[in-house]
Every structure is written in C-alpha cells, then in structure tokens.
Image (spheres, helix red, strand yellow):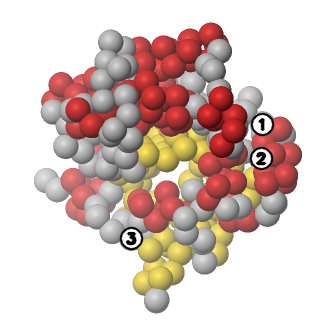
C-alpha cells in the first residue's frame, strides 16, 4: 500500500461500522539505542474519544508520530481501519486517508481571516488553477458556517486570525482539521495555555464531536481530561508502553499511575 492509488482503494474499503479504526500492535521505536516506544499495543474504536496521559518522555508524541507517518516503527504493526498499513504509507497518504493531527502550538494563517483559513483548509482540489478560479458553492459555504458555529467563532469570520486569542486560534485550527473531513483526529495538549473559560468551552466542543469522529487527545490537564473522558477509556503511557487503562476513576486509583505520574 505504498502508492496513492493503493491508499484510495483501501479508503473505499474502510469498515467504519464497527470495531477499531486504529490498531497498534507491539509498536517499538528505537532512536540510537533509546527505546521511545516499547511494544506498545492499543486500539481506538470508531467514534471513540480516547484520552492519553502519562509523564514527559512516556512516548505520547512518538506514538502520534508513528500514526501520522512522521516516524517509522522499528517493529510492530499500525493499521487504520481494516486494511491500511500505516507503516507503508507516506505522511501525505495518511492525511489523505483521513487522519488529521493538531500540534500543541496553533498554526493558522495569521494574515488571513477566520473564514479564509477555513476556506483554505477545505477538502477540495488544491491545484493552482481550480484554486484561483474557485467559487464556493452554497453547500461549501454552509459547511464553513457549520464549522464556525461549532468552534464558537461565528460572528468573527472576517476577523484576522492573528488577532484571535490563544484559545480561539486553537479552535480555528481544530475547525481547519474538520474542514478536511477526517475520520481520526489527533490532538496534542489542546488546552495548553488556555484560560479556564476557554478550557471549559474546548471540553464542550470535543464532547460535541464525540461519536462523529474518532478522537485521540494527549493532555496533562487532569481536570480537562475528566470533563471529556466521561465513561470512556483513559490510557496511561509510561516508558513507551501502556501502564494502565480504564475509566478515569479507575486510572486515578491505580497505585502504579499514582507512583509514576499523578503523585499522592
């Protein structure tokens, strides 16, 4: 599955009616003798919102790098859906297949308006000529309006992105990801640097997305994790593998998690 055509064929056969949309089995990543991931195994169900926590150096970022093709695993397998072997796909092919990633620092086009940022991110033909002469259809405008409401930026669509608050920039970038119509969204510390009010609104946003997209959230803010985890699964990474997994209350009561991460 090394070509773009192969990626498209696999996407058509992606089974999203049940089971896991992401499946990692015994993934190891070794950098110059350092084992960043150590036989890591986990799976994410279709429509699930999964929270990933753990101390610095636990392997959270490396795991996301493997999923998006930025880092190749030393060993193990990573599948998206039933058929796509992520280890055989490029970063571009993986993004095209339906995996979107948001890094901790927001990266928006600051000299463009909120509306223009969403328009530029829209899933469409990005070749020069179609882009230059494109006119948005009513359906496309409706999609942007829908995302604007969802990310709490309706009424700010003509504002320059560079003038937004830190939290609003984070929401805009999430909106830009949603314009790509991803099936799996990876969010790296989405509330870092946010005010309490912005953090609460981000929790509301992710809870609204639950079930419509499969979402993996890497986060250190335990209050925020509690808001979005609800009765879902929280996975704790430590030294490159899964230390514990379960509901938030179960994880918080686990002596191993308390010792290496939460403290007493």
State the residue at coordinates (23%, 61%): 259
Residue 239 marker: 3
Q: Are marks 1 and 3 in contact (CB under 8 Å)?
A: no
Query: In what element is the residue under mark 3?
Result: loop
Tell me: 136 left or right of 233. right
The residue pinned by badge 1 equals 15
Which numbered disc, 2 or 1, marks the residue that appears first in the sequence? 1
Residue 82 marker: 2
Circle 1 residues within 10 Å: few <14, some 14–19, many ≥20: some
Circle 3 residues within 10 Å: few <14, some 14–19, many ≥20: some
**Alpha carbon separation for disc pair 1 and 3:** 32 Å
Q: Are marks 2 and 1 in contact (CB under 8 Å)?
A: yes
**Alpha carbon separation for disc pair 3 and 2:** 28 Å
Circle 2 residues within 10 Å: few <14, some 14–19, many ≥20: some
Query: In what element is the residue under mark 1?
Result: loop
Tell me: 86 left or right of 250. right
């Amino acid at each position: 599955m090394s070509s773009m055509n192969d990626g498209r064929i696999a996407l058509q056969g992606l089974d999203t009616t049940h089971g896991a949309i992401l499946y990692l089995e015994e993934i190891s990543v070794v950098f110059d003798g350092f084992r960043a991931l150590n036989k890591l195994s986990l799976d994410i169900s279709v429509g699930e919102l999964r929270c990933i926590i753990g101390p610095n150096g636990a392997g959270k970022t490396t795991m996301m790098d493997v999923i998006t093709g930025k880092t190749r695993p030393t060993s193990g397998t990573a599948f998206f859906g039933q058929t796509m072997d992520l280890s055989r796909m490029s970063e571009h092919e993986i993004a095209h297949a339906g995996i979107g990633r948001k890094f901790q620092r927001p990266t928006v086009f600051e000299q463009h308006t909120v509306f223009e940022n969403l328009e530029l991110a829209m899933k469409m033909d990005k070749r020069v000529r179609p882009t230059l002469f494109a006119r948005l259809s009513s359906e496309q405008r409706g999609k942007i309006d829908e995302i604007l409401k969802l990310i709490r930026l309706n009424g700010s669509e003509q504002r320059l992105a560079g003038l937004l608050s830190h939290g609003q920039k984070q929401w805009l970038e999430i909106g830009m990801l949603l314009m790509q119509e991803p099936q799996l969204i990876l969010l790296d510390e989405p509330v870092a640097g946010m005010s309490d009010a912005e953090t609460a609104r981000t929790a509301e946003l992710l809870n609204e997305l639950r079930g419509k997209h499969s979402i993996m959230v890497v986060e250190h803010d335990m209050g925020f994790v509690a808001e979005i985890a609800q009765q879902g699964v929280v996975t704790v990474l430590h030294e490159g593998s899964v230390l514990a997994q379960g509901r938030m209350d179960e994880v918080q009561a686990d002596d191993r998690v308390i010792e290496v991460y939460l403290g007493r």
